[in-house]
Amino acid sequence: MVNTALAGTPAPITLTVAPLAYWWPRTSVMDFYADVADGPAQTVVLGEVTCSRRNEWSLDDWLALARDLRSAGKQVRLSTLPLLMDEPEQRAMRRLVEQDEFEVEAGDASAVAALAMACDLAPQRRGFHLGPHVNVYNLDALAEWAQDGCVGWVLPAELPLSAVPAIRRGAPELPVEVFAFGRLPLAFSARCFTARHHHRRKDDCQYVCRQDPDGLLLSSQEGAAFLALNGTQVQSAALHCLLGDLNLVRQHQVQRLRLQPCSRHFDEVIRLFDAALRQSIDASAALRELGRLSLPGSLAHGFAVARAGMAEVATAEGGEDGR
């Protein structure tokens, strides 16, 4: 068998389904992941990544779902919260880190420290992945994390694709994943933005975020979509999309594309990315088809191409890079 890496042929780019950022009804979540199990995405990241008050799913529930997805042939990671605010959340993080049935994606530096310690105490255990909210802005940072047991990392969403080669020099053996579709998580807070919008306290929010399956859209004074509120998270209103930038993705040696779930047509999103990666459809044609779907936002790609984050993707004829 020929080793494609040694032969100079790049490994195929794979798809990762990011953790569900919104609070959907339990039956909707089950139906969603049943579709994912039958779809072409190779990796699925599970777990609550927005608010610990969304407690309908316990760790045992996530583990059971992870086993189902693994039996369907998926690689599964479990993610921790990106912002820990109290001791119960710290305990929940430690319980997740202590299990070794599935790899863990660290949502913040405290999870990285706990995972590094676990790897140091048990060198035979699985390594961990760095989530998009762990600061990896240079090769020295990546090299340090690699020494602590990191086996994969997600490029911070605000960095351009051109940053990947320079950072990867710190640990070229680690696969890099980039955010390729969905509303970008821009900020987190101890406050719940959605509850505050509805004049409710965070500890008595009545789970009002369930009213907005793709976040609560905010508009500027001119009426333009600007941001989205999702509990403790502020997101972009536009959907970050790299479907038209696959040439740049390949050029910068990205191995994985991360797709953030949304409530409408996500199965088509995965299908189009997969078809374009397999080159069974031209990327520009796939992008046009994506643009015709009734998605919860317009398409943008500014951060990835070192422009303003809200820079929209052109879905008309011409230019695979979307410009």
Image (tube, grey):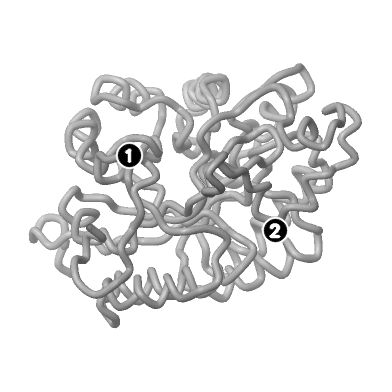
Amino acid tagged 2:
Leu
Mark number for residue 237?
Answer: none
> Residue 215 location in percent, x, y?
66, 48
The answer to whether 224 is drawn above or below residue 144 in the figure is below
Residue 308, label in figure: 1
- Residue in the picture at 8% in, 58% down: 8
Q: What residue type is disc 1 on?
A: Ala
Residue at the (69%, 22%) spot, across then down:
190
Left or right of 290 on screen, residue 242: left
Residue denoted by label 2: 65
* Disc 2 element: helix
Describe residue 93's horizontal placement relative to residue 17 as left or right: right
Q: Is residue 248 above or below residue 149?
A: below
Which quadrant is the C terminus positioned in? bottom left
Neighbour tally class for label 1: few under 14, some 14-19, many 20 plus, Cα within 10 Å: few
> CA–CA distance between discs 2 and 1?
38 Å
- Image coordinates for residue 64, horizontal then vertical, percent: 73, 56
Q: Is 2 placed left or right of 87 in the picture?
A: left
Tell which of 21 and 173 is nearer to you. Answer: 21
Compare marks 2 and 1 and give the one earlier in the sequence. 2
Q: Nearer the viewer, residue 101 or 179?
A: 179
Query: Which mark lies nearer to you, 2 or 1?
Result: 1
Q: In this view of the protein, which residue sits in the foreground, 201 or 91?
A: 201
Expressed as whole percent of the image width and height from the top left, the position of residue 235 reads 55, 41
Q: Is residue 42 left or right of residue 30?
A: left
In the image, is residue 13 above or below residue 165?
below
Q: Position of residue 148 (x, y in %)?
A: 40, 23
Front residue of this view, candidates 145 and 180? 180
